[in-house]
Image (cartoon, rainbow, N blue to C red):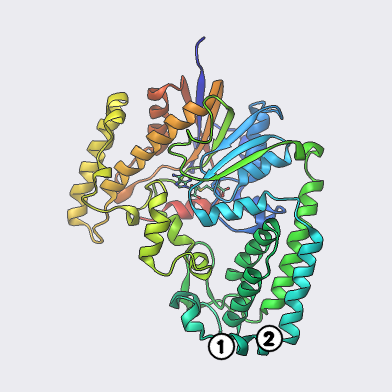
Amino acid sequence: METIKQLSLFSEIEDINSKNSKNEIENWGTFKDSLKAPVHRWFTYPAGFSYKAVIHSIERFGITSDMVVYDPFMGSGTTNLTCKSLAISSFGVEAHPFVYKIAKAKMNWEINYQEAVIFIKKVENIFIKKLDETINQQEFSIENCFPELVIKCYSKNTIEKLYILKNILEAEGLSEPVFDFFYVVITALLRDVSSAATGWPYIAPKKLKPTSADKEVLVEFMKLSYQMLKDIKNIKQGSSENHQKSTHNLFNADSRNTEMFIKNQSVDYVFTSPPYLNNFDYSDRTRLELYFWGDAKNWKEISDNFRTKLITSATTQVLRGDSRYILLDDFRKECDEITNFIQTSAHKLAELRKIKGGKKSYDLMLIGYFNDMYKILKDVYRVLKPNTKALFVLGDSAPYGIHIPTDKLIGEIGVCIGFNNYKMEVLRQGYFILKERIKW
Ligand SMILES: C[S@@+](CC[C@H](N)C(=O)[O-])C[C@H]1O[C@@H](n2cnc3c(N)ncnc32)[C@H](O)[C@@H]1O
C-alpha cells in the first residue's frame, strides 16, 4: 500500500500577499489567547501558537477521539492540554527538564483539593505566626542560598519569603501531583513579585519594575493558588465529558529519537512548533527559574544540564571545532540539493563572521539546526501512521542578512525522507511573535 504522509507548514511571517483567508488566520488566534485561558496561562512560555490553533487544526483535519496526536516539542504543553480538553489522546516530548515539569503539572487535573488547601493554610499560618522564628531558626544567609542574579531581582524581604516558601514546599512531603501544582504556583510567582524587570523573555536585574513594588509574597501566593485551583475546575467544565478516557504520555526526552517509547506508526497527527533558527536560547530564558530551584548555579551548569539537551537553535549552544557541526552523511545522501544549499549558506555565514562584530557562529548553528531537524523529521515520519499529516509552525530567518527559508527547507527535507508533499500557509501573528523573531 502506498504510504501517504503529508507535511503541512505554517509560517509565522507577516506577508501582505498571504493566500490564507482572514477567517483562517483569525481561527488560529494569538498567543495572548493562551495567556487568558484557564491552566494554559499558568506559565508564560513562547508556545509558538495559541490553544485555539490546535483546536482549529484538529477540526480542520478531522482528528477524532479515537486518534492520537503527538507534539515532539511539547514545551509547556499547549497541544497536549488542548487534546485533553477535546478527549483526544496524545504524546508529548520535551527535552528541557524544567519546562517538562510545567507541562506535567498542567496536565494533572485530578489533584487532591483538600491536600492543596491544607498546604495553603499551612503556609499562611507559618507566614503570619512564625515567619521571624522560621527565618531565625534557619540561620541562613541568603547569599549562600541563591546565585547573585536571583538575589538582585528581589528586595531582601521578598527573597527571604520566597526561600521560606520553597523550603516549606520541599519539606512537606506532599503527594506528587500536589507538589507539582505548588511548584508551578511558586514558579509563576517568581517573575510576578520581582522588583526587577523580569518580564518574559529577558531578565534585567538593574531595571526596576514598578508594578511589583507592593506585591507581598503571601498575598500573591494565596491569590495565585486559589486562582489556579479554580482554573482546574474551569478547564474540566469547559472540556469534553470524556476527557478522563483519553491518555496522555509525556516524556522528558529527546525527540530526535523516540524509538524507546513511541512505537512505529502509532500516531495519527503531529502538531508542533519547533525552536526557530533565530538564536533564541531556551535554556538561558529560564535562568531565573533554574537558579531559584537549584537546578543550576551558573552558565556552565546550564550548558551541561540543559543547553546540550536541546536541538541547536542558538549560537550559545555551538562550540567551534565540534564535529557535530558537519552535515550528517545520511542527510547528505538523502537530501543532496538541500544540503548543498545549507552548506553554501554556511560558507557565506562563515565568511561574514570574519568581518562582523560579535563573531557569531551562525554558520555552525545553521548546520546543527538542520542536522537536528532532519533527525526529528525522520522520527516523526516513523511514528506517523500511513495517510496522516504533520503540521509544523515555523518562522524563517536571516542571520547576518543571509535569508534562510527554514519553512521551505523543512518542507523539502520532509519530502526527501518520505512525506508525499508539503504545503505552506502563511500566518500573520501579532507583533509579539514578530518581535521575537527579529534578533540578530
Ligand atoms: C517553540 S517551543 C514549543 C512550545 C510549546 N508549543 C508550548 O506549548 O509551550 C520549542 C520547545 O522545544 C524544546 N526542545 C528543544 N530541543 C528539543 C529536543 N531535542 N527534544 C524535545 N524538545 C526539545 C524546547 O525546550 C522548547 O520548549
Crowdedness near tag 1: few (<14), some (14–19) or many (≥20) residues, C-alpha within 10 Å: few
Residue 270 seen in this snapshot? yes
Which is nearer the N-term, disc 2 or disc 1? 2
Q: Is residue 297 above or below residue 126?
A: above
Q: Is residue 431 above or below residue 329?
A: below
Q: Is residue 213 above or below residue 323?
A: below
x 65%, y 51%: residue: 34
Q: Is residue 147 left or right of residue 195?
A: left
Q: CA distance from mark 2 to mark 1?
A: 13 Å
The yes-or-no answer for disc 2 within 8 Å of ligand 1 is no
The yes-or-no answer for disc 1 within 8 Å of ligand 1 is no
Mark 1 and mark 2 in contact (Cβ < 8 Å)? Answer: no
Q: Is residue 409 left or right of residue 194?
A: left
Three-letter code for the amino acid on which mark 1 is drawn: Glu
Q: Quadrant of the C terminus?
A: bottom left
Q: Is residue 173 left or right of residue 98?
A: right
Residue 243 rendering spot, x and y as whole percentages: 76, 39
x 42%, y 30%: residue: 378
Name the residue that disc number 2 marks. Answer: 131
Residue 279 rendering spot, x and y as whole percentages: 38, 53
Q: Which mark is residue 208?
A: none
Three-letter code for the amino acid on which mark 2 is drawn: Leu
Q: Secondary structure at mark 1?
A: loop
Residue 339 rendering spot, x and y as whole percentages: 28, 32
Residue 92 rendering spot, x and y as whole percentages: 57, 41
Name the residue that disc number 1 marks. Answer: 139
Query: 171 or 277: which is nearer to us?
Result: 171
Q: Secondary structure at mark 2?
A: helix
Query: 194 or 435: which is nearer to us?
Result: 194
Using the rendered view, name the quadrant where residue 296 is placed.
Answer: bottom left
x 63%, y 27%: residue: 61
Furthest residue in direction top, as rendered:
1
